[in-house]
Image (cartoon, helix red, strand yellow):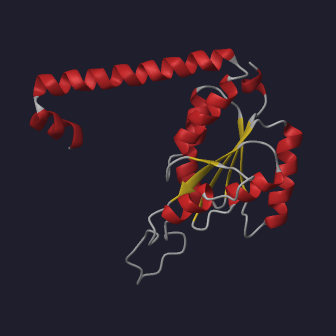
Amino acid sequence: MAYSKKPLVGIIMGSSSDSRIMQGAAEILDEYKIKHEDQIVSAHRTPSRLAEYAKHAEQMGFKIIIAGAGGAAHLPGMIASYTTIPVIGVPILVYNDKHPKKSDTSKFSAFGGLDSLLSITEMPSGSPVVAVGVNKASNAGIYAMKILANEFPDLKKKLKEHKSNQHNSVMKESDQLKKEGLSKFAKKKFQ
């Protein structure tokens, strides 16, 4: 299929530290053989590169851009301002471990990712960006598949299989829970 031959999805992130979260989107797309192109594009540190990337994405024929960013999280909104390609924003909980200080006892943002979530979801009218939950890059990958499934019927079939597999997994766990009892089930599951 065309989606496995040339990239139709661009995955961008504001920093290399975001890669640990954004890999979730890549893993979903890889699982379903959807080719993607991945880059680091910082809205704040490389603004001219951001504009160049938007042109590049259009020239490449990308159908979707998945953009992950933490903190002020301007990347998804800024890339959306440069292109008509749908943008899925992934708010990322900022970790303070890139340049750790010995006196720093807190590794996480004081806002717990809420700053990123609000930055992405509260775009001004006329400049929409779709947002998934904090650190939910795999959901962005699934959402990208849903958009592509409108053009590629075999992806729609794969999505239906994915939903069926989720259903079967829950039913299997429920049967196991019923059989073993809650205490035993929880001990086995979370130890």
7 vs 153, left or right, is right
In the rendered image, residue 6, in percent from the top left (x then y), is placed at: 79, 30
The residue positioned 69% from the left and 28% from the top of the image is 148
82 vs 42, left or right, is right
Does residue 25 sit above or below 123 in this rendering? above
The residue positioned 57% from the left and 67% from the top of the image is 71
Does residue 60 sit above or below 116 in this rendering? above
Number of marks present in the image shown: 0
The residue positioned 49% from the left and 22% from the top of the image is 162
Q: Give the quarter of the figure containing the C terminus.
A: top left
The residue positioned 55% from the left and 22% from the top of the image is 159
In the rendered image, residue 104, in percent from the top left (x then y), is placed at: 42, 80
68 vs 107, left or right, is right
Does residue 162 sit above or below 43 in this rendering? above
Residue sitting farthest toward the front: 125
Nearer the observer, 109 or 146: 146
Residue sitting farthest toward the bottom: 103
Using the rendered view, name the quadrant where residue 156 is placed.
top right
In the rendered image, residue 51, in percent from the top left (x then y), is placed at: 84, 58
In the rendered image, residue 52, in percent from the top left (x then y), is placed at: 86, 55
Using the rendered view, name the quadrant where residue 144 is placed.
top right
Nearer the observer, 172 or 117: 117
Q: Give the quarter of the figure containing the N terminus.
A: top right
